[in-house]
Amino acid sequence: MFDGRVLLKQVILLFWPLISTWVQGAEKIDSCQLQVLEMLSSLGSAGGKSAKPSFVSYVTPEEIKSEKEPSRKEKHPDLLPGEVVFCSASTVLKYTQDDLSQRGVFGVLLCTNFRVSFVSDEEPTEEMVRTLFKNKLYGENDIPLSCVDNIYGDKRKLITGGLVKNKYPSKMIIHCKDLRVFQFSLSFSKEEDAKKIFQGIVHHCLEPKSLRCLFAFSYCENTSPNRKCVGGLFTKLLRKKQTVMFDSVEDWTQDMKRTKGNCRVVSENSNFELSPKLPQYFIVPKNVSDEDLTKYQGKGLPMWCWSHHSGCALFKTASIPLVQEDNVCCRMLTAVAHNHLYSVKTEDLSDTLPTVQDILLSYNKFKQFFLIDNTTEFWMSDMKWFSSLDNCGWLDIIRQCLQKAVEVVESLEKENTNVLIMEEGGSDLCCVVSSLVQLMLDPYYRTLLGFQSLVQKEWVAGGHAFLDRSNHLHLKDKVESQSPVFLLFLECVWQLQQQHGPAFQFSETYLTVLSDSVHVPVFTTFLFNNDGHRDSLLRAESPHTQRSPLNCPTVWDWSVQFDCKAQDLFTNPLYTEKPKQDTSVRKSYRPRHLRQLSLPSSAFKTPPKKGFFKDEADNLKKILGVKRLSRWMLSPSSDSPQTSSSVREFYEAWQTKPLDYHGLLLPCLDGPSIRVWMQRYLRWIHDVQILGGGPVAMLSKVSEILGEVQELQRQLDRHGCTLTSNHKGARPRAKTAAAVIAARSSVRLSSSFPFVTSRNWAFKPAIPTSLLQSLMVTGMPGNLADREDDGGPESLV
Amino acid sequence: MASASIPVYNRSNNPLENSSSQNDPSVTLNVPLGAIGRVEKMGGASSRGENSYGLDITCKDMRNLRFALKQEGHSRRDIFDILFRYAFPLSHGLLLFAYLSQEKYEENGWSVYKPMEEFRRQGLPTDKWRITFINDNYELCDTYPTILVVPFKATEEDLRKVSTFRSRGRIPVLSWIHRENQAVICRCSQPLVGMSGKRNKDDERYLDVIREANGTAKLTIYDARPSVNAVANKATGGGYEGDDTYQNAELVFLDIHNIHVMRESLKKLKDIVYPNVEESHWLSSLESTHWLEHIKLVLSGAIQVADKISGGNSVVVHCSDGWDRTAQLTSLAMLMLDSHYRTLRGFQVLLEKEWISFGHKFASRIGHGDKNHADQDRSPIFVQFIDCVWQMTKQFPTAFEFNERLLMTILDHLFSCRFGTFLYNCESARDTNEVRSKTVSLWSLVNSDSTSYLNPFYTPESSRVLYPVASMRHLELWVTYYIRWNPRIRQQQQSPVEQRYMELLALRDEYLKKLEELQLTDSSPNSSHLSNSSASNAASPTQHINHLHTPF
């Protein structure tokens, strides 16, 4: 299969001028050919000139010749279905990241339509083969093209696409979006090869391309039916039975029923007649008229997110820029208010939270602390670590999002008012806040499948523009819209998780892997801007247009990336299910209401400032008619000091109650409580690995004992002993990582487990360099720093 | 006067307590009198306002207390006088509470540390190192313990000569020896080089004898101070070992600042966490205290010492007098190198040895029972050391047998004066004041209830050297200690991980028992001897069987 493909490509390349004319006239063309042509044409157009120079630039007769030699072929990584090698160079030196010395490994550097890959000349040692947490799609020396963040040349000069001519740097540094740093020296390779590989990598990683060029399409076309069947059965089971995809009326109805919501499921958009930007299916308040559904392309429509057990609900909306004469927003607001007791509170997130650009800027500063080229630099920055962290503002953005979510939770839980959150597009910070609110209030979303369903509901179906926000395609006009909003959400989840570990069924590792998967261009989950976008593309890309649309995996098909054992690390050994006896006692048990605070019995008691009442509605409508939405809305944080103190009171009241991991969860927002996600950000930095330590040391002991308990359980079950479920919920259910951990008990775990194994570590401790220079003790009264400890007698007087 | 603490009713305007005290007006506070650093009257007869008249108490354990009192009746004077008198007994000719306490414990904590036993555990004496009783009457050095380990080759006369060249006679003595490579950690005070750059052949030869003992080419001398301070010390007669004079030695400065800097740093830290945690720019404020940077420097100094020893090189550690920074470095390095010190008992031995017996000036640094709160000798050196230990336990949660509670208890009783353990500056003073016979040891309390100080995750790994990562990325503020008086910091008795672990352990035991019972019932009475797995517990099988419902 592969050989044929390469050969075909080469043939096409050689006869490119001929074929291209032929193609233009041809109607039907093999999908494989189309693939190649697509790539070539995008390459040509990117150069802005004729196709010829770029064609010459990276595939030459020499290469074709050499690739025919069997010895070269062995140097390929195991190519994935649909993966094609563009170019390669041998005797490339990959520096070992640890130090400034020029030590490294020689090997072949390749660029395919999926990844940049380095294949070491050295035979992999046995230990290296049994990498414990192996991603099936890419290895530790592979960088998926969409995962490349920045490329630097000599003297750390940033390489931007398009400017590369005939030159190439002797040293190439690649910063990845998953924070790995690769350094390659090209100075030992043949000049031609070096030039080709450099230009190839720059071209495929940095220059604009069309969505069809993303690897997902050729991957999905070429995943063989066999494989689909084996994995498919399992994954289908997972998909249909467990992770709710929110791509059908039933899914939405089910979720609304689960939360006892009382709204209306809209299916009029199932073929995107209303608007391609609206979800295929969604839920609006009962009082929204059919007429309003069709207006403004869905802008201003309050979309239901979640219903609180009291009856009030959370809605989100894309704000309407200027209110039209027909008072649509007034009607919408009334509709929301009608949902429960005529109370509604609105919050324009555009006014109170950072913009997507702020988020990007802050994150760009933040990530630099972890993209470490050399250790000297790292230790130099160490002394100023806290203030640099402070200055980049990333933790503060996380705090603000969490705080906003707590405010919304307070309105729902304490005041029982409906809440409508809005922002311009309705699909960025609205997604962050609404999902956080649901995580805090609803323990279902803290389970693995619940969480995946939440992401489907709020982010995928909710129309978060994953493609634009990640700018996989490097489109110049989309540079502005790039922003790590989803990552910000995961960061917030991590904060909640590290404060309330036992409440979450999934582990920190799961979140880290999920954040990496955004940059693996294989999963439909993260490739599109909304339902409509996905639908149209998958349909158009289907090789057999008559039949079903192209079937790509979603990220939730974890078996595409990890085998079962590795997937075990996604579960949190601290998590326990809800004690079972409750269900037996009363059927109507609803898990999320256990931790009610003492609430005002009706929303009518809430201060008028915070809610709207029926008799005020007329007055309200008057105001509504003329002003911008965001103006008249009583935005709670316009008077922010008051709000934050109210949030604090709410938190303190919650905190005095006994903690129930299956009830309401609130984050502590004090300075010391918001932290850096160590696993994600420090995992590749050698000098800060705690060998044999870190939280994993403790968690693995929990997993170990959990494994023992499960084994005992099985034995007992075999004895036909029915274990009553009165074990305070401690009875474990989920399969855990116990087996995996036990298997590697000989290997010493480090704080970057499971991402880096300890095999390569020297036992030398990292000794911080340049200590004194950076610690200048200033502002000491009376030169205390120069004084003696127990000075001369004169100081004792 | 039977109790050292004052249960008081807080009628304060403490902003933290305000909201909670509305619901529950009588808040009981327990403050050991020993923890009080300063008592002041606030407001005068003419003071207006609800809470402007009363008492202001500054504590040594990171909190301040304010009591608003009624102006009528002059009640304040009485309480002030009593507090002042009993909080600072030494300034009023009274005894410290430890001498009045009648507490009785099952264990006698004073027997925890026996120097000879500890040296024997380390494999001493050897053919290169001998035990000397030259300091039996504290004549060689009044701040050292009586039993010392010195190079076999050095005679008593040599020791006396060396002691004249070392500040306060604190000569280099062995603190720890590596069992395999025989590399040693020696500790001492600075050499008395002075402005003129004096030399002392005996001292030079003595250090070379230390080097020779395990046959390595170079001896590393770690001077804990920043080099500028070491140079400045020459002016007062001190200094450091010059490269040219000490032939086979290399000198490394570890850049750790002095006691005054540390005191100011902790003061700043208190400012940003008490009574409220600094809200805006928390991290920058934290950085500006430099507290964690000092922790980093101490830890990285100890890492370097431990690394040298692991590599087979002997080291000598000193600062100026060798009782503050030196104690921090040697004890932390030993904690990294020797797993024994990471056990509950071993850690007590470590403190007794490196801190208490080698004369860390607890009395001066803490100011037990002394009213002079502005004394420049006070400094949280020991608190800083315990913080370093905490950082290590945080980074290696399975490597220590003891838990955070032990560290907190130690710090609480560092101030409380309830136990004799941390009283006085050195062994000779303790002898004079009969601490061992007249007071109770803190370890009596701890070892009588040792289970509550144990870390369930502890996994002994005897030969393992622990290198913590001394990077700001991994150092954290010890929130549960420094901010424990803030009601918003959740004080969990057990961490959720620990709780879950204990639950699972209990469950395992329960299942094991069940399984055993089942196996017993499954096998008929006459074949019960076949099930060898439960043989050990099968002493009285009938008892178990009675509880079970058997299918027959």
Image (tube, helix red, strand yellow):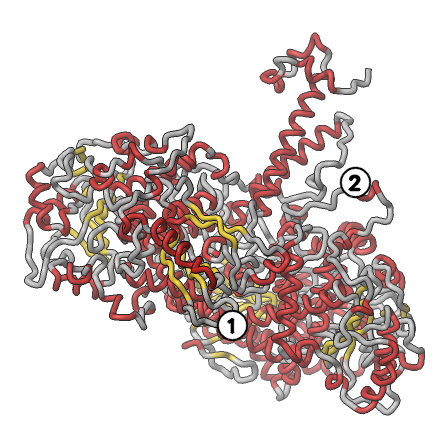
Q: Position of residue A483 (x, y in %)?
A: 63, 75
Circle 1 residues within 10 Å: few <14, some 14–19, many ≥20: few
Q: Position of residue A365 (x, y in %)?
A: 51, 74
Q: Residue at x 50, y 55 (%)?
A: B484
List the residue tagged with mark 2: A581
> Mark 1 — on which chain does it sit?
B
Disc 2 secondary structure class: helix
Disc 1 secondary structure class: loop
> Mark 2 — on which chain does it sit?
A
List the residue tagged with mark 1: B280
Specify whether residue A564 is in view. Answer: yes
Can you say whether B34 is above or below A653 in the image?
above
Q: Outermost residue, front direction?
A: B73
Q: Amino acid at mark 2?
A: Gln
Q: Position of residue A294 (x, y in %)?
A: 89, 81
Specify whether residue A356 is in view. Answer: no
Can you say whether B281 is above or below B535 in the image?
below
Q: Residue at x 34, y 48 (%)?
A: B332
Could you give the CA–CA distance between mark 2 and mark 1, rounded to whole angstroms?
A: 46 Å
